[in-house]
Amino acid sequence: MAKQSITGIDSGSGDASRLAARGISVGYGARTVIDDLDVAIPSGVITTIIGPNGCGKSTLLRALSRLLKPAKGTVVLDGDDIARLRTRDVAKKLGLLPQAPVAPEGLTVADLVARGRHPHQNWLRQWSSDDAAVVERALALTGVSDLADRAVDTLSGGQRQRVWISMTLAQGTDLLLLDEPTTYLDLAHAVDVLDLVNDLHESGCTVVMVLHDLNLAARYSDNLIVMRDGSVVAQGHPSEVITAELLREAFGLHARVIDDPVGDRPLIVPIGRTHVQLDQVATQL
């Protein structure tokens, strides 16, 4: 039976992939960052893209959202080549939160979230009570209703991230792409934002995000995509993907992987160079 999303959109069975990259090559100018990459985003789960700096995580997310056009290959959204869709139609299906977005000075929370309804407006269809209801629901779902009259630039980092996520929800999509949503946040605010992401997932959203913190990625994700040098080197559930060998090969990190004491997920304990050297000496004795 189809699952009904928080936005009222039929999100399907949760088994198929609504979003996929097929043989895409993407870069900036003459520099190729991703070359001939294939990846499918499973529906109905939280997928997190991880990898070392410069491996192409954000580039992949931008290509999936149509912010970057592949030099070759295709991004497929709901069975269609995303490059052939109108921008307005893409925005009705997919919401993107870029890195560190900035709101115009003095813009209120309610006005920013209302901008999420822009894809649904045209000269025949102006603002309506239905739009207002969607905005109110997006504010409520993200826990920022009491901030509606506040200026966005007066909020804390965690509050701002909630507001921006609220705006993407107001687009009426249940497919969210979040590029480093915990950037510049302390640990408490980062956990708060990821708890919100998990709540949205449980309400019917498919989420794709980029994170740097591997333990938070393992804790909050159902599916990990591990990248290195513009390629996908592993994909799957955190308990299957996160191993000491993968951490060495993909990140150059020596670490031990143990069971997370608060869940059935892996927990990464970095060893560091000093302890690696001591282990090597002990092995030689």
Image (cartoon, rainbow, N blue to C red):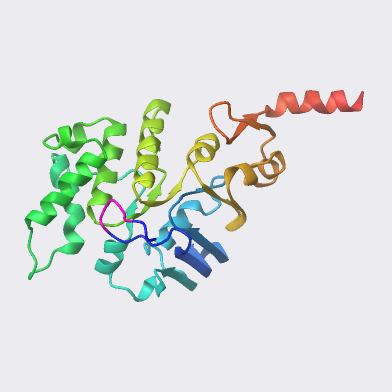
Snapshot quadrant of residue 109: top left
- Residue drawn at x 69%, y 46% is 249
Snapshot quadrant of residue 2: bottom left
Residue 128: image location, x then y, percent = 7, 58
Snapshot quadrant of residue 106: top left
- Residue drawn at x 8%, y 58% is 127
Q: Is residue 39 left or right of residue 281?
A: left
Outermost residue on the right side: it is 285
Residue closest to the eye, 275 or 134 = 134
> On the rendered image, what quadrant is the C terminus found in?
top right
Above or below, 3 relative to 146: below
Residue 28: image location, x then y, percent = 46, 62
Q: Is residue 231 left or right of residue 185?
A: right
Residue 177: image location, x then y, percent = 38, 53
Q: Which residues are magenta?
A: 4-8
> On the rendered image, what quadrant is the N terminus found in?
bottom left
Outermost residue on the front side: it is 1
Number of numbered labels in the structure image:
0
Q: Is residue 196 left or right of residue 105?
A: right
Q: Is residue 124 left or right of residue 21?
A: left
- Residue drawn at x 46%, y 69% is 70
Q: Is residue 92 visible?
A: yes
Q: Is residue 29 visible?
A: no
Above or below, 207 relative to 187: below
Residue 138: image location, x then y, percent = 22, 46
Residue closest to the eye, 155 or 46 = 46
- Residue drawn at x 63%, y 46% is 241
Q: In terms of secondary structure, what is the magenta stretch mainly? A: loop
Q: Is 7 inside the magenta-drawn segment?
A: yes
